[in-house]
Image (cartoon, helix red, strand yellow):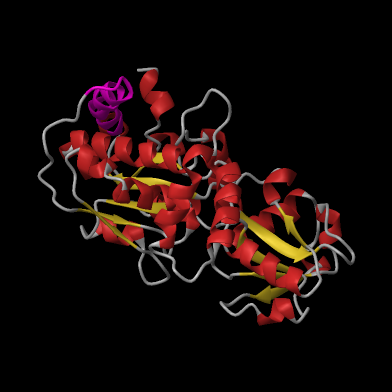
Amino acid sequence: MIHHLLRAFLLLAVSGLVLLSLAGCGPDPVSPEAPLVYRLKWLYNMSVVGDLYSLEHGFFAQEGLEVDIRPGGPERDAIKELEIGRAHFGVASADQVIRAVAKGSPVIVLAQLFQVSPLQWIHRAGKNPIQTPDDLKNRVIGITYGGNDEIIMHALLAKHRIGEDEVEFFSVRYDYTPFYQGKVDLWPVYQNAEGLIISEKLAQAGEDAGFFNPNEFGIRFVANSIITTEQMVREHPETVSRFTRALLRGWRQSLDPATADKAVATVQRFDRDTSVALLKKQLDATRTLMMPLSGKDFGWIDSHAWKQTAGIMFEQKLIAAPVSVDEILLSVEKLRRK
């Protein structure tokens, strides 16, 4: 990891360019990287609507950039691809970033997408509803061992002094059958994506779905954020500025209710298996999770939530030493104060 002073220099180097972009100035000269590779965290779905919108509606091109947006998945880790030079930008959750930085990875966070984590637990709301952490006792809770949902659930139980012997954990795979069969009471989902798909299937069976949201009970765990490397910021700050400007513009417009039909049509070109009706519901859910607090720009980085995430990971011994997240967060709010 580079020295603190070098990090400060990197922030200052790019700050002027980002501030110019915020003021609405024209794009800088064309970057030498063509095309830029942007690796997503997961597959094409409504959770990446702003990324696809920026590409399909020419926002990258208007900045003089050619961008190749590639889907993510279990075998496609954005951070690893950044480290070995196979990607210029990527999407990762805070726990992935913090783990990597703790091991010396040169990752920089450019913007935070989800302001409320979409990772929640779906459950049947009709019988024995789950409304508070105490309602988790004696329940079978699905978790992905090694995933951020495992971290979140352990933190939630610890915060509310619920012993792990008071719940039963179930190892989650891609097959939702155990949940449909009632063998598991709570199943981890992205509330704005597969959460709505499962909700519809429950409704068809005459059952109501509910969502248990850890954010409502004090666990603010940061989800997807836009990342790059220290080298990219240092050597091509104008490219970083233009890429971020185009991407955030696409996100803002895709979440605007006035352009909802265009946003749905954009995602449908990449996700043909999901109906238009369901995509519209997913867009509405995504909007509520991503819009920042009043007075904040889209992409605002919640540094307090990042610090809580890092603290939880250290407490659970997932990182060997504390990580100072202020050193890796290149937020617009921070740049405006320079």
Q: Residue at x 39, y 17 (%)?
A: 337
Compared with 338, 77 (above or below) is: below
- In this picture, residue 47 sits left or right of residue 25: right
Evaluate whether residue 327 shows in this view. yes
- Identified at 28% across, 61% down, the residue is 81
Location of residue 101 with respect to 2 vertically, above or below:
below
Q: Would you identify the image quadrant in which residue 96 lies? A: bottom left
Q: Which residues are magenta?
A: 7-25
Relative vertical location of residue 284 with respect to residue 257 in this rendering, above or below: below
Residue 3 location, quadrant: top left
Q: Is 17 in the magenta?
A: yes
Task: Tell me if residue 322 is in the magenta stretch.
Answer: no
In front here: 108 or 180?
180
Q: Residue at x 50, y 45 (%)?
A: 260
**Percent x, y of residue 80:** 31, 61
What percent of the width, then of the height, locates residue 131? 83, 53
> Would residue 306 appear left or right of 82 to someone viewing this image?
right
